[in-house]
Amino acid sequence: ARKLGPLPPTFYFSEYQDMTLQITADFQVDFFNFIYCSIYLSLIIILLFSAQLSVRQLFMSCMRSSQTLHDRMFEKVAFTNSRFFDLNPNGRILNRFSKDIGSIDELLPPVLIDTNWALLSGSGIFILISMTNPLIVVGIVVLLLILLTIRKYYLNASRAVKRLEGITRSPVFSQLASSLDGLTTIRSMKIEEMLIEEFDYLQDIHTSSYYSFLVVNRFFAFCGDLMLSLFTASMVSMFLFYNRDATGGDVGLSLTLSLALCGMIQWGLRQSAEV
């Protein structure tokens, strides 16, 4: 057998150079991964801090607005003439101070937060979809116009029913306040059952109007879900019959982003209608 001679020095130098390049490449990869992770972690921390700060500022602004409105209302009521109390029963005044101010304190801040979140997140997803699959943008714009039209009619019906609910709530407070003021007379005349029946009647009227408001709200949600289902079905049909060359990744990304955007649009429109 032929005996192999020693390897030339250039072989060892080549191996050493390859090992050096591999170590340098691994070090560069690890270094850049560390830089990217640090930047990503910093962005997450900044995002959490800015989100907490914005939510706190929004709640503080709503609280100051509610306090200012309550103080002005109380000042006007306290220094008004007696004719105001003749024209407005106690229930209507209590309704304004309890229900309306309570809506500002409890409902307005979370509704504003949800609306802003849906608007900003939806804008980002819309830009991403327009870069990946511009054809879906046309369907999303049509869906948005349809939902805005439905929202327009929903606002008219919702405001009318909400106003009716507020009108039917005032007699409940008025009857309760009058019953408490004349409690001695009621017991002496033994007309407790009559006042209980009257209170139940007023409460039934108020409950029926409030139920109508819930029905209108649910109908708007049903229309939004129906439009979203039709849009999803049409988009899947488009990929099945008209765009068969699309890869699985593009189809999955388009469907996921489109469904997320449609859900945000629907939720944002519902929350904005409550403002």
Image (tube, rainbow, N blue to C red):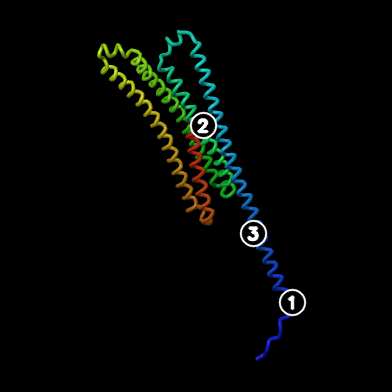
Say whether marks 3 and 2 touch (CB < 8 Å): no
**What amino acid type is highlighted by mark number 2?**
Pro
Q: Taking 269 as reference, is 212 left or right?
A: left
Q: CA distance from mark 1 to mark 2?
A: 74 Å
Q: CA distance from mark 1 to mark 3?
A: 30 Å
Decide which of tag 1 and tag 2 comes sooner along the chain.
1
Q: Which residue is mark 2?
A: 109
**What amino acid type is highlighted by mark number 1?**
Thr
The residue depicted at 40 percent of the width and 24 percent of the height is: 165
Dot 2 falls on a residue whose secondary structure is helix
How packed is label 3: few (under 14 Cα within 10 Å), some, or many (20 or more)?
A: few
Say whether marks 1 and 2 touch (CB < 8 Å): no
Quadrant in which the N terminus is drawn? bottom right
- Asked if 102 appears above or below 246 in the picture, the reply is above
Q: Nearer the viewer, residue 228 or 218?
A: 218
Q: Would you identify the image quadrant in which residue 94 lies?
A: top left
Dot 1 falls on a residue whose secondary structure is helix
Q: Which residue is mark 1?
A: 10
Query: Of the residues tagged 3 and 2, which is closer to the observer?
Result: 3
Q: Which residue is mark 3?
A: 30
Q: Nearer the viewer, residue 69 or 128?
A: 69
